[in-house]
Each structure stands twice: as structure tokens, then as C-alpha cells.
Image (spheres, helix red, strand yellow):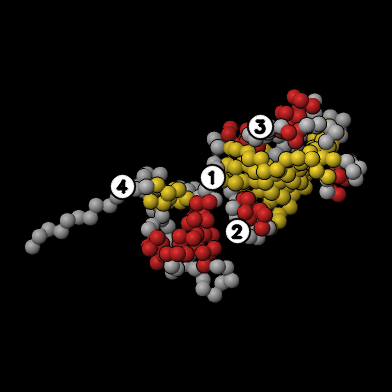
Amino acid sequence: MSTPIPKVLPSRDESESEFPQVTPVERDSPIPVYAQVEQDLRRLSRAGSALKVPAETELAAMYGVSRVTIRQSLQRLAAAGLVKREHGRGTTLLPRPEVGLDLSLFRSVTDQLREAGHKGKVKMLQRGLSPAPPDVAEALQLKPRDKTVLLRRLVLVNDIPLSINTSWFPAKLVPGLQKVQLDDKSVWSYLANHYGLVVVSTRNTIEVIESGAAETEVLKVDYATPLIKLATCFHDKVDCPVEYSVSLWRSAQLKFSFSQHL
């Protein structure tokens, strides 16, 4: 009787953990099955270690769904930067590092991310002259016909969308700002260096909202995902409002900190 040849398993990167127990889909749930699989894989990505994803057929059996469903879920996760595909190594579910930001510091988000060891990047989505919405005009102490410079930017951490920031500046204070390339540059530094505007105080409001169609597309999240909405009015040394911004942040893996000096 011949001796069976032992099965040689492929080597595993020490940084990759064994794939944990999954939560099978619920057929009577109003949430589509591909979304249930995606949400569960997002949950597993918070574990802190890279996870080698089983083959599609095996993963389909674990969740009780078809390979088409698994493929759709993985494609959505790939678009969100949560899985990596490598020839010869398969698919890896990437960990989602915790991101901490100190909002009491008048420093750019990307600078804070980079100092924490993350890859921070800003992508300009929109810029130009625009009339201010009524609440923004009131905060900036503008008249109805006064123009603002509108900047809408996407903040990414490790190539994953983190925040959509929309800022309005009184156009009379920052002439020509709408023409300046500010990708990956600190807006506050530019305001100080070119317009002499230095922010010394803020007034903030924070609330939790649900993502709509636009946020779902840009931030790569599910519809009605909780987002942290931070509205801030920035004032200079003579208490003149120089910027009003609304930031929508992905709430998962994000920590805000504040400090106050009396």
C-alpha cells in the first residue's frame, strides 16, 4: 500500500490571519444579499489584520449565496479600496486602520494623517464662484448678492475616501482663489501667505446624518450609512468670518479629538 503524499498548503504571509467565521445572509431581509455579504466583509476588515479571502466558490458556500453575488460584493469592496487582488496570490481583505484627527488644531487634515503614518491625499471635486446658500451667507455675514469662492474636496486616507469637504469663502476676501490649484496643499497656509488671513477661532456644530445618493457614490459607502457632519465657521483675529465649511466624514474607524484652553 503506497504512502499518501501529503498535501502542501500554500505559504501564508505572517501579516495575514486565518479567515474568521462569517455571518450567513438572511433571505427574508430587505437588504440585498450582495449588500449583506459586503457589510459582513467590511465588519471583518475592522479586525486589524489582512485576511486572505477564500476562493469565490468557498466563500459563496460560507455565505450561502452564488458566485455572482460574491463577485459583485468583492467588486464593490475593491472600489472602496478594501480588497487587493494579486496575480498568483488571490484576493486579500485589507485592514481598516483607525484614523484620529485633532480638530482643535488649525492644521490641515492631510498633514495630520501623514504624521500619523497614513497616506493622506486631497482631490479637488469642484471649484468656482458661487452664490452662498442662505445659512452660509448668514454665517459669513454676506449680503444676498455677494459671491463666494466654493471649494469641494475629497480627502482620502490610504487611497480610501474619508471625507467630502465643501468650503465657502467671501470672494471679496480671496480674489482669484477659485483659479488656484490646491490639491494636496493646505488652504489655510495659502490664505495666510497670499491674503493675510489667519484663523484664530471656530464655531462648530456636529451631527450624524445618513448618506444620500451623492455621498454613496463619492465616499463608496452604502445608502443611508451614518456619516458625521461637521459644520464650522472660521474667524480671524478681529472675529471676521473668513470660511464656512461642511465636512461629511465616514464614521467607521474615525476618532475626533478636541482640546480647549481656558
Tell which circle, 1 or 3, labels the residue nearer the N-terminal end: 1
| Total numbered labels | 4
Q: Which residue corresponds to mark 2?
A: 222
Corner quadrant of residue 186? top right
Q: Which residue corresponds to mark 4?
A: 11
Task: Give the CA distance from mark 3 to mark 4.
Answer: 43 Å
Task: Give the CA distance from mark 1 to mark 3.
Answer: 24 Å
Numbered label attached to residue 97: 1
Corner quadrant of residue 244? top right
Q: Position of residue 46 (x, y in %)?
A: 52, 51
Is 139 situated left or right of 77 in this image? right
- Nearer to us in this view, 210 or 215: 215
Task: Give the CA distance from mark 1 to mark 4.
Answer: 25 Å
Task: Give the CA distance from mark 3 to mark 2.
Answer: 30 Å
The N terminus: image quadrant: bottom left
Give the residue type at disc 1: Pro
Mark 2 vs mark 4: in front: 2
